[in-house]
Image (cartoon, rainbow, N blue to C red):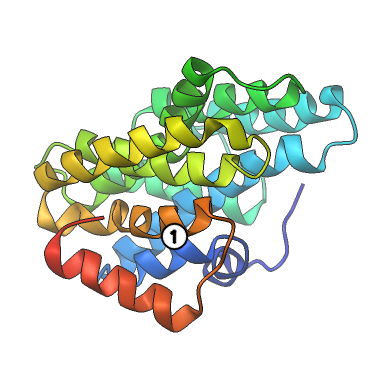
Amino acid sequence: MADDPEDLDALVKRVDPDRWLSSRFIGDAQARADVVALYAYDHELARAPRVASNPLMGEIRLAWWREVLDEVFEGRPVRRHATAQALAAVVARHSLPRAPLEAMIDARYRQLDAAPMTPEEALAWAADTGGAVAVLAARLLDPSADPEPARGAGAAWALAHRLAAQPDLAPVFQAQLKAARRDVRRLAIPAFPAAAHAALAQGRAKGGRASDLRRQLALTWAVAWGRV
């Protein structure tokens, strides 16, 4: 199950460029690395339904990560995998709860079903994937503030990526993005990088990919004004 390269920052830069760019606005190097570890964990879960040859293999991959959580939260030695080791360190350093990390696993099981998601299923899936990661990252960046306003931004970003497989969810995405733009105004300034990548969601939803410079400018504007 090991991933290559071992350098998680390089991995996330390659597979998750939007959130990697948003993490560059985290000034503290350790906090930035911890947020990147959360993105690497989300990437590993997202791979399960995407690379598995059949639903059973996908279930096996997801079960493997549930066993990682068992090791992390039961204080047992954690298997030698770069993301698993990094996740264990982040959980210990910030006393992160198990429930959202496990909800992220549960949400990926829905993708093993080839049937299209209903709007309600899509919203729940997005809240427990991209939304959960954003909340955890916001909590990590500012433990004294409410991290929940980041959930909608993370969910909107996840839905933007889902549109490639299910374009009929476009109205759901637009509604979620509108809500996210309202909610992030309540997010603490130090935690804003956890939600900033939602500023790129509209472009992703349209199927395009702006240049690195344009995305950097969009994120700079978002962080400067606290808007997505």
Neighbour class for label 1 at 10 Å: few (<14), some, many (≥20)?
many
| 201 left or right, relative to 44 | left
Q: Residue 71: x percent and y percent?
A: 56, 31
Q: Position of residue 6 (x, y in %)?
A: 65, 66
The residue depicted at 62 percent of the width and 39 percent of the height is 45
Residue 205 image position (x, y, % from top left) = 51, 50
Question: Which is nearer the eye, 203 or 141?
Answer: 203
Disc tally is 1
Kind of element beneath mark 1: helix
Q: Is residue 160 left or right of residue 141?
A: right
- 100 to 216, vertically: above or below: above
Quick check: 140 left or right of 74?
left
Q: Is residue 71 above or below residue 133?
A: above
Is 1 above or below relative to 125?
A: below
Residue found 44% across the figure and 30% down from its top: 172
Q: Quadrant of residue 196?
A: bottom left
Q: Is residue 190 left or right of residue 195?
A: left
Farthest bottom residue in view: 213
Q: Quadrant of the C terminus?
A: bottom left
Where is residue 167 drawn, in percent x and y? 61, 37
| Badge 1 amino acid | Arg
Identified at 48% across, 79% down, the residue is 212
Per the image, the residue denoted by label 1 is: 19
Residue at 44% in and 46% down: 157
Any part of residue 133 in sight: no
What residue occupies the far right of the structure in this picture?
53
Q: Is residue 157 visible?
A: yes
